[in-house]
């Protein structure tokens, strides 16, 4: 892999850094050099120092000083869990909120939202994102057509601002009814707020111009809460990097799978909530394009969760809502579904009848029993250990030695409860967790009318390569890909992405209304161009992509349909309508559509993409030859113990391996089952064919 | 039978997944807010013998009514259940919660052999009764809409147009309802297909073994939980108000056999629509058991084995034709939830699970029904915002502010913007009501309220009714009752003419307020442009004496504007600074 010729200043090196909960992953890509990858501990207390530590490690691996490395860098992409952590920990700035008079409890009632509380009658709703005492009302009103009914009462605004100042808030959220149709009132109040005090001001028609005042308010309030700390962090990252010698503006990954400048992201921190995981999906997309694969299931299995995302016909699966802090918010994000299945998931027995796995997890402390850190419950990792599938010396990069006896002990105890041997218990645990992961994939495919057999499975994250073959065969998937950079795949995906602004607007109109549709798209596109302009993206490097959400009149759920570029006419909208009906019937069954109800457009969206320097994935010569094992291990498989050859990676391109086999790479092991074949391809990925 | 602990776990998870996916198809294809927003739906999977193994993944009470309706289908089509069939049911005496909840139930065949059943139910906005939706003025059940005892609506895998159209011809909003009903059929198709794939993959024996062990597990878990309760007999009476006051009475016996609820002493059936049939009563009782006693357990056919319910025939919760009963689900049904919760709370009091005991949740029903023809000449039916009740205080925490009914665990309210977009209406306010909580060491949740007027049309027929104006939610162990519900109107407020000065609040409208009676006075009431209606739910009841409430919590409520200074001092004995 090499960087494209950089016309930017600074040179042509590319750096990606992904700050995770435990580890910070870094990747450095230089022309005609093998990629340099590092994993350094995450520094929660001082994230900037943590980032610098990772860059130091990269520079050291490249035998160069950090200053020189940064000076040669054409692009630095950064992903962080900071925003997500603030949400999980309930932290953030002190926020005040202003809304339409009569509706101060919108955030408090949160649409009742009992489904977010659950079935247990002792559970409670998550607290309002802004305490009721700091929510202020202003007289103003717009109707559902966007017409002004009552002007903004500036006396109310003044009263609210005085009170907010007395409260000592750091940030203010602002959401009026129907502001996404007519933003004049919000604009006026936002101006007043900005000239009154140095507050971080989060305005609903800018943060989430979409229909539904609760979700729009929640998004705006959460954005305000995250604003000051995220802004401070991002700007200090930018400053430190500049000080250390980076000559280009660093970019940060958004949940939607594109990069933004630190300044842009700092005004909309709510777009950073799944900054990290998005990277792995994007990396999968790029590799898949090189390999000529249109349909990919991205599977990331770590210690506690299994994350799935889809690429269908070359397109990422996107969602526009997510749940954070017990609130439902609007956020354009790569749709990643997470279930509690990981190496640390705990096995247990229900009433002597059923072996079960999870949702409890041993986490990293004490971790699985075989880590020898005092874990006393049988986990998925212990089951893998018991079956002989783990690299006995290479766990966590050689830092941990496997305590196989501890694994045996906990599995024996668990097995007694259902009358199974430790080996059968271990196989049971693995097949249950594999089936749960398959079910998670089914809920993303079969449940949406997609056939998993038409997909290739990309496995990355520490534990996925051990389980991928079994999941694939359960779902009838033929091809499994374990990328060379699997352990730092998100960091790679981050630096490999382009700048992307997502502009959206709710406007519920019949699709026959070409005039309105055309003018909203024109407005969104003009906004996109202006944003790319200010990023300094040259005209030739700008791409605008349209999308629309359609539904039958009266429905609540809408379906995403790609929207052609070019002039919007009655004819082009008719074609769009036909495409919607086709998509709808594919998703929900033939005969389920109801064209007589009429089709309406709900949300219009423009992706404004700025092409940046991205790594080139170069094919290397890969003449096929059979691999030579470096050792062998006894592995329990299908009820018996077999001798399995083990290969120490990285392997040369072209190496072919027949299952059963184990491939040990630093930080991960791949299981190649009986009847499967694996080949290291020209991009150095391990491509497994499962029967 | 030799049960495989691994394979049955895998298949059982898969079955739950299939149930979820069925419900999701229904939700995604339907159009009515009751399905999509309020998630008033259920999806069941049962074995060939009709024993439910996947119990309503959505609103729990549909799980029980679907089981009843499945049994009715099995009886009616005893020797004539054919592959590719689906049956439509909404008859309350065949198991429907009430006539507006339509179920579609389908046998699943494998190699020509009946192996399982799937089915789903959801609320429809109309069934062609004397008034749209529920019929608060009905005097017999034939006035309440078209009745389907199990009727074949899909034959050989194809929708029977004659039956499908019979339904559409009899309802007021056929455009929306045709999508809703098709969504129900699609959901069954999707789930049946997946069940067959599952059996193909693992074999019929493994499937049957899974059903068997799941039911065994359901029963074991339920019995174990029930054994934690204090054995004995508990008694409770509760009331509901409509055209008059009605009384429900129940005795709960907890012994080795399990739970036995006996409703002897409950009032005879009413002449109004507040009645319900037995399946609705049992479903609501099961609903509370599922959420209060078994929230963390598997729920299926086995769960209900140790639960026995006796209801004498012909009471307000076991009515017979031709008694009207379209109000059932949300009136007597919810009242059964309340009495069940009160009895469980007594039995939980001295058990290791005393944390599950709680005061009564707001339980009434406020149903604003404004209907008319829009400018295009089509029917619209503008309903209320659910029932914005406060939750009951729990043994260890305050009740939830604006929580809706205890057993309606999936509900949410549509946004004001989606209402104003869909219907000719303008909201003046929607919020929570300070001081409406039942006071207590743990306070009840506050009620919600809203005020709105017609917007864009001149008038609408108004068949608004409600329950819970004269009876409150009841406190526990010294906790106080919550505030009752109310619906009132200010007519001739000319609110639309006054908008440019700023939208007024309801309390600022200086015209006379008319408090609605619970039962509408007749079919000819209308609401006009410029009239503003005000609807408030019930406050949840308190748990423990208010004197025991910690001062810091009283001060927090004061600061949040949830409590007035007068009430803080009077009820909690805390003086504002």
Image (cartoon, helix red, strand yellow):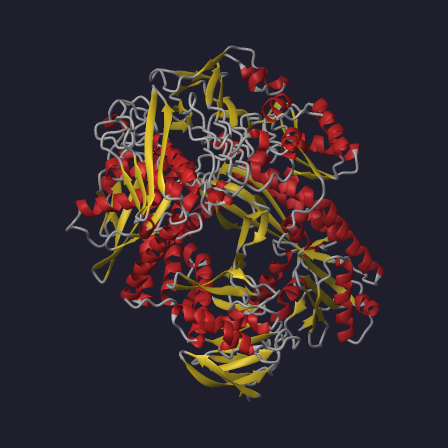
Look at the image and tell me whether residue A85 can be seen: yes
Left or right: A51, with A481 as reference point: right
Q: Position of residue A339 (x, y in %)?
A: 51, 58
Q: Position of residue A61 (x, y in %)?
A: 75, 75
Q: Position of residue A372 (x, y in %)?
A: 60, 73
x 55%, y 71%: residue: A291
User: In terms of depth relative to the viewer, which is nearer, A380 or B122?
Assistant: A380
x 60%, y 59%: residue: A277
Q: Position of residue B331 (x, y in %)?
A: 36, 29
Question: Which image quadrant for residue A493?
Answer: bottom right
Q: Residue furthest left?
A: B79
Q: Quadrant of the C terminus of chain A?
A: bottom left
In the rendered image, the vertical position of residue B511 relative to residue B436, given as above or below: above
User: In terms of depth relative to the viewer, which is nearer, B378 or A540?
Assistant: B378
Look at the image and tell me whether residue B327 can be seen: no
Left or right: A33, with B193 as reference point: right
Question: Which image quadrant for residue A542?
Answer: bottom right
Q: Quadrant of the N terminus of chain A?
A: bottom right
In the rendered image, the vertical position of residue A496 relative to residue B474, given as above or below: below
x 47%, y 24%: residue: B484
In the rendered image, the vertical position of residue A52 relative to residue A382, given as above or below: above
User: In terms of depth relative to the viewer, which is nearer, B576 or B172?
Assistant: B576
User: In terms of depth relative to the viewer, which is nearer, B151 or B441?
Assistant: B441
In the rendered image, the vertical position of residue B569 relative to residue B113, given as above or below: above
Left or right: A23, with A243 as reference point: left
């Amino acid at each position: 892999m090499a960087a494209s010729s950089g016309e930017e200043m600074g040179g042509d090196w590319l750096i990606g850094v992904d700050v995770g909960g435990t580890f910070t992953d870094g990747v450095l890509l230089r022309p005609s050099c093998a990629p340099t990858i590092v994993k350094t501990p995450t520094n929660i207390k001082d994230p900037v120092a943590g980032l610098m530590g990772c860059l130091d490690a990269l520079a050291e691996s490249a035998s160069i000083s950090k200053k020189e490395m940064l000076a040669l860098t054409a692009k630095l992409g950064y992903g962080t869990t900071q925003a997500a952590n603030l949400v999980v920990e309930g932290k953030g700035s002190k926020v005040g909120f202003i809304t339409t008079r009569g509706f101060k409890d919108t955030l408090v009632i949160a649409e009742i939202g009992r489904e977010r509380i659950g079935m247990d009658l002792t559970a409670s709703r998550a607290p309002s994102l802004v305490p009721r005492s700091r929510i202020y009302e202003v007289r103003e009103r717009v109707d559902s057509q966007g017409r002004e009914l009552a002007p903004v009462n500036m006396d109310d605004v003044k009263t609210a601002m005085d009170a907010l100042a007395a409260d000592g808030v750091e940030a203010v959220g602002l959401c009026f009814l129907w502001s996404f149709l007519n933003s004049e009132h919000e604009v006026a109040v936002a101006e007043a707020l900005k000239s009154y005090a140095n507050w971080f001001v989060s305005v609903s028609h800018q943060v989430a111009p979409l229909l539904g005042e609760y979700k729009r308010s929640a998004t705006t309030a959460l954005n305000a809460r995250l604003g000051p700390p995220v802004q401070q962090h991002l700007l200090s990252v930018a400053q430190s990097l500049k000080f250390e010698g980076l000559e280009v503006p660093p970019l940060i990954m958004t949940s939607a799978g594109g990069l933004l400048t630190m300044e842009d992201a700092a005004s909309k921190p709510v777009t950073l909530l799944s900054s990290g995981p998005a990277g792995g999906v994007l990396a999968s997309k790029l590799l898949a394009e090189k390999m000529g694969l249109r349909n990919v299931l991205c599977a990331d299995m770590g210690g506690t969760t299994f994350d799935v995302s889809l690429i269908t016909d070359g397109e990422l699966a996107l969602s526009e809502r997510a749940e954070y802090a017990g609130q439902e918010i609007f956020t354009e994000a790569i749709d990643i579904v997470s279930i509690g299945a990981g190496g640390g998931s705990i096995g247990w027995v229900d009433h002597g009848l059923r072996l079960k796995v999870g949702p409890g997890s041993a986490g990293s402390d004490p971790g699985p029993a075989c880590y020898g850190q005092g874990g006393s419950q049988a986990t998925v990792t212990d089951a893998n250990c018991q079956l002989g599938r783990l690299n006995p010396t290479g766990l966590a990069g050689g830092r941990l030695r496997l305590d196989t006896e501890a694994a045996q002990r906990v599995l024996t105890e668990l097995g007694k409860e259902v009358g199974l041997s430790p080996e059968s218990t271990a196989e049971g645990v693995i097949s249950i967790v594999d089936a749960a992961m398959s079910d998670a994939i089914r809920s993303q495919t079969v449940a949406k009318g997609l056939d998993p057999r038409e997909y290739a499975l990309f496995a990355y994250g520490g534990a996925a390569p051990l389980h991928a073959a079994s999941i694939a065969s359960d779902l009838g998937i033929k091809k499994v890909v374990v990328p060379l950079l699997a352990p730092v795949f998100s960091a790679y995906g981050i630096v490999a992405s382009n700048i992307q602004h997502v502009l959206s607007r709710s406007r519920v109109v019949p699709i026959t209304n070409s005039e309105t549709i055309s003018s909203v798209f024109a407005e969104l596109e003009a906004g996109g161009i202006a944003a790319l302009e200010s990023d300094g993206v040259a005209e030739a490097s700008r791409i605008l992509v349209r999308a629309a959400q359609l539904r039958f009149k009266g429905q609540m759920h809408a379906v995403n349909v790609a929207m052609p570029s070019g002039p919007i006419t009655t004819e082009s909208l008719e074609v769009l309508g036909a495409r919607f009906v086709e998509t709808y019937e594919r998703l929900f069954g033939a005969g389920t559509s109801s064209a007589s109800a009429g089709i309406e457009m709900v949300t219009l969206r423009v992706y404004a993409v700025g092409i940046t320097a991205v790594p080139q994935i170069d094919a290397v010569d890969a003449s096929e030859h059979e691999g030579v094992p470096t050792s062998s291990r006894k592995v329990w498989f299908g009820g018996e113990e077999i001798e399995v050859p083990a290969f120490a990676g990285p392997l040369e391109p072209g190496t072919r391996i027949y299952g059963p086999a184990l491939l040990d790479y630093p930080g991960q092991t791949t299981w190649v089952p009986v009847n499967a074949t694996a080949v290291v391809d020209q991009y150095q990925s391990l491509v497994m064919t499962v029967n | 039978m030799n049960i495989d602990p691994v394979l049955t776990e895998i298949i059982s998870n898969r079955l739950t997944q299939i149930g979820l996916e069925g419900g999701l198809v229904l939700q995604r294809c339907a159009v009515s807010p009751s399905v999509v927003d309020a998630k008033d739906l259920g999806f069941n999977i049962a074995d060939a013998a009709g024993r439910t193994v996947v119990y309503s993944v959505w609103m729990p009470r549909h799980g029980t009514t679907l089981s009843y309706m499945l049994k009715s289908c099995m009886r009616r089509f005893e020797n004539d259940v054919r592959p590719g069939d689906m049956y439509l049911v909404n008859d309350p005496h065949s198991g429907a919660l009430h006539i507006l909840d339509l179920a579609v139930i389908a046998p699943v065949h494998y190699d020509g052999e009946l192996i399982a059943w799937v089915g789903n139910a959801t609320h429809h906005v109309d069934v062609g009764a004397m008034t749209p939706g529920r019929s608060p003025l009905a005097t017999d059940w034939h006035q309440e809409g078209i009745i389907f005892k199990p009727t074949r609506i899909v034959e050989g895998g194809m929708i029977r147009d004659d039956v499908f159209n019979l339904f559409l011809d009899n309802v007021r909003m056929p455009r929306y309802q045709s999508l809703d009903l098709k969504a129900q059929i699609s959901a069954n198709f999707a789930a049946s297909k997946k069940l067959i794939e599952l059996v193909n993959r693992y074999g019929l024996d493994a499937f049957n073994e899974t059903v068997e062990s799941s039911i065994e597990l359901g029963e074991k878990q339920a019995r174990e939980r029930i054994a934690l309760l204090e054995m004995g007999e508990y008694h409770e009476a509760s009331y509901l108000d409509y055209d008059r006051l009605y009384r429900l009475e129940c005795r709960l016996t907890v012994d080795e056999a399990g739970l036995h609820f006996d409703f002897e002493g409950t009032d005879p059936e009413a002449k109004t629509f507040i009645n319900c049939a037995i399946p609705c009563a049992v479903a609501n009782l099961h609903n509370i058991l599922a959420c209060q006693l078994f929230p963390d357990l598997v729920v299926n056919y086995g769960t209900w084995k140790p639960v026995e319910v006796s209801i004498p025939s012909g009471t307000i919760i076991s009515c017979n034709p031709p008694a009207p009963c379209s109000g059932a689900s949300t009136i007597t049904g919810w009242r059964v939830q309340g009495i069940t919760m009160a009895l469980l709370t007594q039995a939980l009091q001295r058990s290791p699970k005393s944390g599950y005991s709680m005061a009564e949740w707001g339980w009434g029903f406020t149903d604003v029904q404004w209907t008319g023809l829009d400018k295009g000449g089509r029917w619209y039916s503008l309903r209320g915002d659910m029932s914005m009740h406060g939750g009951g205080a729990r043994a260890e925490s305050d009740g939830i502010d604006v929580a809706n009914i205890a057993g309606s665990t999936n509900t949410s309210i549509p946004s004001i913007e989606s209402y104003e977009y869909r219907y000719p209406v303008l909201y003046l306010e929607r919020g929570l009501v300070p001081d409406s909580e039942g006071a207590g060491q743990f306070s009840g949740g506050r009620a919600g309220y809203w005020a709105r007027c017609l917007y864009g049309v001149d008038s609408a027929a108004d068949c608004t009714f409600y329950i819970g104006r004269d009876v409150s939610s009841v406190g526990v162990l010294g906790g106080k009752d919550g505030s009752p519900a109310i619906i009132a109107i200010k007519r001739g407020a000319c609110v639309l003419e006054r908008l440019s000065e700023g939208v007024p609040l309801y309390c600022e409208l200086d015209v006379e307020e008319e408090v609605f009676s619970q039962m509408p006075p007749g079919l000819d009431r209308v609401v006009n442009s410029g009239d503003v209606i005000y609807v408030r739910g019930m406050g949840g009841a308190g748990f423990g004496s208010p004197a025991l409430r910690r001062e810091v919590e009283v001060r927090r409520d004061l600061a949040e504007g949830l409590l007035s200074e007068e009430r803080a001092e009077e009820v909690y004995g805390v003086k504002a600074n």
